[in-house]
Amino acid sequence: MDAYSWTISTDLQNVGLIPSFESLMSVEPCDDLSVIVVAIDKSRDPGLRELLNGIVSLSNSRITRKDLIDHLANIVCSRLGGQTWTEENLSSRWKECTQSLEDILHSVILPIGSLTVGLCVPEHCSLSIS
């Protein structure tokens, strides 16, 4: 797969088609490559499994729905770096986190359970796969 020429197709026949996991695994991260894939795969992501187990345990406890929601929000916020007040701060923390993971994993595929910073992606950049 040529990572430099791959784009999400706007051709209606190809909408939703993305490279295979194996193809993406073969892409070596580099400074001028803008492809980052955040994988949500509990079979390959021990950090995500750990988080899900904690959430299941929490949801089985005898607390109110509001308390459960508050706990879940705190877990997600804490896990993804806490609050930030400026977009520049968040953006620089995201770049540092993803660069570090790319260096460690030698891949553009980043397991969501390993992320320590969350970043909101504008709606026009997202991909929906059904």
Image: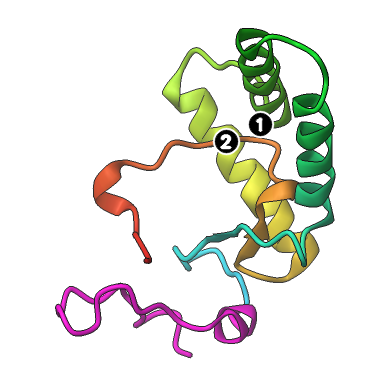
Q: Amino acid at mark 2?
A: Gly
From what the image shows, is residue 67 above or below residue 128? above
Nearer-N-terminus badge (1/2): 1
- Where residue 67 appears, as percent x and y from the top left, is 68, 9
5 on left or right of 54: left
- Where residue 59 appears, as percent x and y from the top left, is 75, 27
From what the image shows, is residue 30 above or below residue 111? below
Closer-to-camera residue (14/32): 14
Q: Which residue is mark 1?
A: 80
Give the quadrant of residue 73.
Answer: top right
From what the image shows, is residue 14 above or below residue 34? below
Q: Quadrant of the C terminus?
A: bottom left
Closer-to-camera residue (58/128): 58
12 on left or right of 118: left
Q: How is the image coloured?
A: rainbow
Give the quadrant of residue 51.
Answer: top right
Are the residues flagged by discs 1 and 2 in contact, CB closer than 8 Å? yes
Residue drawn where x is 77% and y is 66% of the image:
44
Closer-to-camera residue (45/107): 45
Q: Amino acid at mark 1?
A: Leu
- Where residue 110 appears, as percent x and y from the top left, is 65, 59
Residue drawn where x is 59% and y is 16% of the image:
83
Residue drawn where x is 58% and y is 69% of the image:
30
Q: Which residue is mark 2?
A: 118
Question: How far separated are the C-alphas under marks 1 and 2?
Answer: 5 Å
Residue drawn where x is 57% and y is 35% of the image:
118
53 falls in the magenta region: no
- Where residue 49 appears, as percent x and y from the top left, is 80, 50
Residue 105: image tag = none
Q: Residues within 10 Å of mark 1 (few under 14, many from 20)?
A: some
Magenta-colored span: 1-27
Q: Considering the numbered disc 1 on the image, is that residue within a helix, a strand or a loop?
A: loop
